[in-house]
């Protein structure tokens, strides 16, 4: 699937599917040493000045799209559940997004303090948080998105939905993978990782690194004026008249 | 003789423009999240208004300026970070490079949602022709029935090489100013 994405064999709609992205990215990460790729990546998850604690982590097992039960027996399906051996937080749940936001976001009215009800909130992270609580072991919930910077309002809305001011919910950007790879020369040399970088490039998932330099290419065409009456022809602002210009190829 | 690469170059040119917009969007996205973390609330999702899809307005198909505007505790005030990417040719002498502009505007007793604000993102150039030197300036429109006060500064877009520069050149000075005026924003 990674190569289908890389070679543009998928429709735009398919490319935008977060499940596809989760599968391609974590499908690669799974086959690399966790201490080189998975843990440095997850270690960048943070929110409100707190970072995900992976101290003591030695290895991890992956469960893609597990079904978890909420308190009221309704089910939810996060994208990835990681069992991290040796870590103080052994269960890490990843909810991945690409172009969409959380599903079932509580609307502004429902999120007011008067009516917010932890058990009945539709907020996707809130539902997963409640389901994770049922596992009865320390956990962290990582909201993995394409944002360049933390979607603070979205996470605060989830915290409000579960009526907590501080819960183990963290934000991580897909874009952080680029810096993890850049810091480790061994990783950069791995063909699988090079494919992954190409995928991140294709999906425009690099972090903000300033404005690129653009090359001005010589072109042999111009806007030309049809009528002599309007010498300045290409106007930048409105005129009620029909445009007085056209595309023409410059000869010679 | 036609240049055989003209067609390819035309497509590439537009892709370069889209890439450029993508990078500017990242810049504004980082600014948005950082300011939200400090308690500012985004006032509007759209990055630009007043564009056009009409054939007779081709110059307005692409945005000239893009902006993030934020609410603070004072209802008549908007904090903003904008990028002036281009303006009309009459500003060519003033706008010699893209500028990131940041500051606040106080509409006084007017509700900012009821006021025409198309000029706010480009005010740095349109009002007073200020240089992109990072220095704060203050402008007041006291003659109007509804006085408006604007305080802002600008820096060259190309001086922002990444998030650290965005923080040090734009966001930290902005937050320092905002928090000194509306201290209850925090938390």
Image (cartoon, coloured by chain):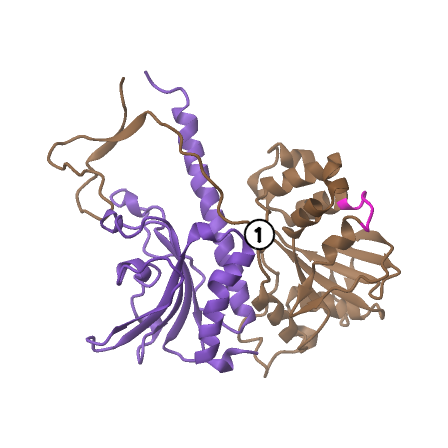
Chain colours: A brown, B purple
In what quadrant of the picture does the N terminus of chain A appear?
top right
For this view, does B130 lie left or right of residue A131?
Answer: left
The single residue placed furthest to the left in the displayed view is A229
Q: Is residue A33 magenta?
A: yes
Secondary structure type for disc 1: loop
For this view, does A243 lie left or right of residue A40?
Answer: left
- Quarter of the image for residue A83 reads bottom right
Residue A1 seen from this side: no
Residue A176 seen from this side: yes
For this view, does A203 lie left or right of residue B138?
Answer: right
The single residue placed furthest to the right in the displayed view is A86
In what quadrant of the picture does the C terminus of chain A appear?
top left
Q: Is residue A158 magenta?
A: no
Viewer-nearest residue: A1 or B143: B143
Viewer-nearest residue: B179 or A135: B179
Instruction: State the residue at coordinates (52%, 62%).
Output: B167
x, y percentage for residue A136?
85, 71
Which span of residues is magenta-colored? A29-35
x, y percentage for residue A42?
74, 56
Instruction: State the residue at coordinates (60%, 47%).
Output: A205
Q: Is residue A157 above or below residue B109?
A: above
Q: Which residue is mark 1?
A: A99
Instruction: State the residue at coordinates (42%, 59%).
Output: B46
x, y percentage for residue B137?
33, 68
Report crowding for label 1: few under 14, some 14 to 19, many 20 or more residues within 10 A (C-alpha): few
x, y percentage for residue B78?
39, 71
| Chain at numbered mark 1 | A
């Amino acid at each position: 699937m990674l190569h289908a994405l890389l070679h543009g064999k998928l429709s735009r709609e398919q490319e935008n599917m977060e499940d596809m992205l989760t599968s391609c990215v974590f499908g690669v990460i799974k086959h690399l040493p966790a201490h080189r790729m998975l843990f440095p990546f997850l270690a960048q998850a943070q929110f409100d000045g707190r970072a995900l604690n992976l101290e003591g982590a030695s290895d991890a097992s992956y469960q893609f799209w597990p079904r978890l039960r909420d308190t009221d027996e309704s089910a939810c399906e996060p994208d990835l559940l990681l069992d991290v051996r040796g870590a103080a937080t052994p269960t890490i749940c990843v909810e991945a997004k690409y172009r969409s936001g959380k599903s079932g976001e509580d609307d502004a009215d429902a999120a007011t303090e008067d009516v917010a009800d932890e058990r009945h909130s539709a907020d996707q992270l809130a539902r997963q948080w409640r389901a994770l609580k049922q596992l009865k072991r320390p956990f962290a919930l990582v909201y993995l998105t394409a944002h360049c910077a933390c979607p603070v309002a979205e996470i605060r809305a989830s915290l409000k939905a579960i009526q907590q001011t501080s819960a183990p919910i963290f934000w991580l950007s897909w874009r952080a993978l680029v810096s993890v790879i850049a810091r480790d020369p061994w990783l950069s040399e791995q063909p699988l990782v090079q494919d992954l970088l190409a995928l991140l490039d294709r999906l425009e998932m690099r972090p903000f690194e300033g404005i690129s330099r653009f090359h001005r290419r010589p072109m042999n065409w111009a806007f030309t004026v049809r009528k002599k009456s309007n010498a300045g022809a290409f106007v930048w602002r409105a005129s009620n008249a029909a445009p007085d210009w056209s595309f023409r190829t410059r000869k010679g | 003789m036609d240049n055989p690469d003209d067609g390819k170059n035309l497509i590439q040119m537009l892709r370069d423009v889209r890439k450029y917009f993508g990078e500017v969007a990242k810049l504004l996205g980082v600014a948005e999240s950082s300011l939200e973390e400090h308690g500012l609330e985004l006032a509007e999702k759209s990055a630009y208004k007043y564009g056009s899809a009409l054939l007779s307005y081709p110059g307005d198909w692409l945005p000239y300026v893009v902006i993030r505007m934020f609410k603070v505790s004072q209802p008549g005030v908007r904090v903003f970070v904008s990028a002036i990417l281009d303006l009309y040719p009459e500003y060519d002498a003033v706008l010699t490079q893209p500028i990131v502009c940041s500051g606040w505007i106080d509409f006084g007793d007017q509700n900012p949602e009821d006021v025409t604000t198309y000029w706010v993102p480009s005010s740095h150039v349109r009002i007073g022709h200020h240089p992109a030197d990072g220095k704060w300036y203050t402008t007041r429109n006291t003659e109007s029935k509804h006085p408006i006060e604007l305080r802002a500064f600008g820096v060259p877009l190309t001086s922002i090489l990444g998030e650290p520069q965005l923080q040090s050149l734009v966001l930290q000075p902005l937050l320092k100013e905002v928090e000194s005026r509306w201290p209850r924003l925090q938390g």
